[in-house]
Amino acid sequence: MQTIEELLESKNIRVTAMRLLIYKFLTEKQIAVTLSDIENAFEKADRTTLYRTVKTFEEKDIVHQIDDGTGITKYALCEKGCNCEIETDLHLHFHCNNCNETVCLTEHKIPQIKVPDGFVSENVNLVVKGICDKCSGQ
Amino acid sequence: MQTIEELLESKNIRVTAMRLLIYKFLTEKQIAVTLSDIENAFEKADRTTLYRTVKTFEEKDIVHQIDDGTGITKYALCEKGCNCEIETDLHLHFHCNNCNETVCLTEHKIPQIKVPDGFVSENVNLVVKGICDKCSGQ
DNA sequence: AAAATCAATGCAATGGAAGTGCAATTACTG
DNA sequence: CAGTAATTGCACTTCCATTGCATTGATTTT
Ligand SMILES: [Mn+2]
Ligand SMILES: [Mn+2]
Ligand SMILES: [Zn+2]
Ligand SMILES: [Zn+2]
């Protein structure tokens, strides 16, 4: 089991207090978060720093971006061993219309999607919307 | 075959010159369009009018909104007989990474997606990204 | 037909999120 | 410890979406 410090170093990211805090925040959240969520959690820090930290994490495949259709970009930690870099880590995302939370369903891979002749599929974004387990009350 | 006027009236939308023009524009375009696209096509008209016209069309299930991941909302005419209102008209959308165009693949229905116990699926957004037929050169 | 009513349009302004330039600060290197 | 490079904070900008309000235009009522 590697520490967060070790993880960051292994990805060639300098360890800073801010980065450790944000990484920890992301691990504790079980859902995808917006930049505003992070802002609210770290009111002392500057928005830009938080923004750039997340962008750094994204470049280094520590988090992946999620477009759940709300119009606001969300981020979630990548699973260990995920292959974000080859854009083939195609798990689906679930957005709850009730609580507005979005979760990664990493177990649920996206099925092969057929496209018409002449079209070349490189990447797929699949978001299921509905009621999450917490809100459906079971 | 009903005229555009008849279609609008059947949906309880007042027929105006602007609405006829925008509807016609949408039928001529074979791809999903942004508000800016419409703006450029109607430079004499005010952006707000165009915006509200499209919103009206959307409410009345004449167009549907498409989130193709570019961050800019696009719109396309609904097929006749589509069931946007019950959110079960689940065709997929294709976004070309080369020409940046997005098309409805209305023939390609979205397969049934399994979600974990406790989750209730109400709607699915599926966007395939890659190279379109025009750009793949075949 | 004129008055009254209601919807559509145009203009101006706002809000929210994303992104950038630059200076100040902090961390690393020798 | 000095020099260098990366990180952080502040201010500013851009872009798209959205709203308030006055004006114009169309429809209905008398
Ligand atoms: Mn995910
Ligand atoms: Mn479509
Ligand atoms: Zn929920
Ligand atoms: Zn193309």
Image (cartoon, coloured by chain):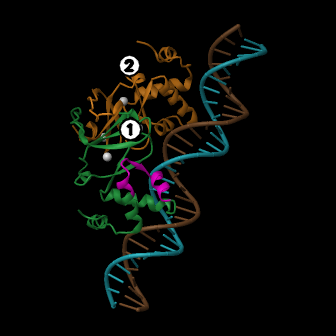
Chain colours: A orange, B green, C brown, D cyan
Question: Residue B4 appears in which quarter of the rendering?
Answer: bottom left
On screen, residue B88 versus residue A46, left or right, reads left
Visible residue check, residue B75:
yes
- Which residue in the protein does label 2 denote? A80
Q: Can you tell which quarter of the image residue C26 is in? A: top right
* Residue B35 locus on image (x, y percent): 45, 53
Q: Callout 2: 10 Å neighbours few (<14), some, many (20+)?
A: few
Q: Is residue B47 left or right of residue B25?
A: right
Q: In which quadrant will I find the C terminus of chain A?
A: top left
Q: Mark 1 lies on which chain?
A: B
Q: What stretch is highlighted in magenta?
A: B25-42
Residue B58 vertical placement versus A28 (above, below): below
Camera-near label (2 vs 1) is: 1
| Mark 1 C-beta to ligand 4 under 8 Å | yes
**Viewer-side residue, B1 vs B37:** B1
Q: Tell me what residue is drawn at x 48 percent, y 52 percent.
A: B36
Query: What numbered label is drawn on residue B134?
Result: 1
> Can residue A45 be seen here?
no
